[in-house]
Amino acid sequence: MTDFLKIRIEQGQKLILPRHIIFVEAKNKHSEIYCIDFRRVVSKHPLKWYKFHLEEPYFYRIHDSFIINCHYFEHIRDGKAKLLGETYVPISRNKRQSFETNLEKYYNQVEILPFIPK
C-alpha cells in the first residue's frame, strides 16, 4: 500500500495516510473521507477514484456509496458494518458475500495488532 494519498481538496492538495482512513463516502460528485481522529475531509475525487487507489483486501467497497478500511471493521448487524467507534455503514445485499470473502483474505494477509494512535 502506498505511504500517502494525494487528495484534491477545495484549498489544493492534502496528503492522507491510507491507514488513517476509516471509510470514504460518496457525496454527489465528490467524496468525504472519515479519519481515525474523527475528522472529515471533503475530497474533490469521486468514489471510483478511491476504488483504484485503496487496495483490496485492506479496503473494500461494501456499497455503491461506501469504501471501508477492513482494519476498523468490527462486525455486521442489521445489514450494516460496525466500524471504529459507533460508526455503522450499510452493506449492499449483493456485496455481502464478496465482502465476507474479502475479510478472509484480509485476515490471512495481515497480523491484527491492537490500534495505538500516534
Image (tube, rainbow, N blue to C red):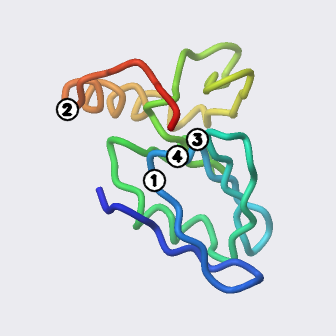
Q: Distance between the Cα atoms at labels 3 and 4?
A: 6 Å
**Coordinates of residue 86 in the picture (x, y in percent):** 74, 21
Q: Distance between the Cα atoms at labels 1 and 3?
A: 9 Å
Dividing the picture into quadrants, the one containing residue 106 is top left
* Residue drawn at x 62%, y 80% as measured from the top left: 8
Q: Look at the picture and state if 70 lies above or below 32.
A: above
Give the mark count: 4
* Residue drawn at x 72%, y 40% as measured from the top left: 38
Which residue is most to the front? 118
Given the image, on which type of amino acid does mark 3 rest? Answer: Ile
Residues at discs 2 and 4 in contact (Cβ within 8 Å): no
Q: Point out which mark residue 77 bears.
A: none
Q: Distance between the Cα atoms at labels 2 and 4?
A: 19 Å
Which residue, given by chain and number where applicable, does mark 4 sit on?
A: 20
Residues at discs 4 and 1 in contact (Cβ within 8 Å): yes
Q: Is residue 76 left or right of residue 118?
A: right
Q: Point out which mark residue 18 bears.
A: 1
Q: Is residue 74 left or right of residue 100?
A: right
- Which is more N-terminal, label 2 or label 3? 3
Which residue, given by chain and number where applicable, does mark 3 sit on?
A: 22
Q: Distance between the Cα atoms at labels 4 and 1?
A: 5 Å
Q: Distance between the Cα atoms at labels 3 and 2?
A: 19 Å
Given the image, on which type of amino acid does mark 1 rest? Answer: Pro
Q: Nearer the viewer, mark 2 or mark 1?
A: 1
Q: Residues within 10 Å of mark 4 (few under 14, many from 20)?
A: some
Dividing the picture into quadrants, the one containing residue 23 is top right
**Coordinates of residue 5 in the picture (x, y in percent):** 46, 68
Q: Point out which mark residue 109 bears.
A: 2
* Residue drawn at x 51%, y 47% as measured from the top left: 61
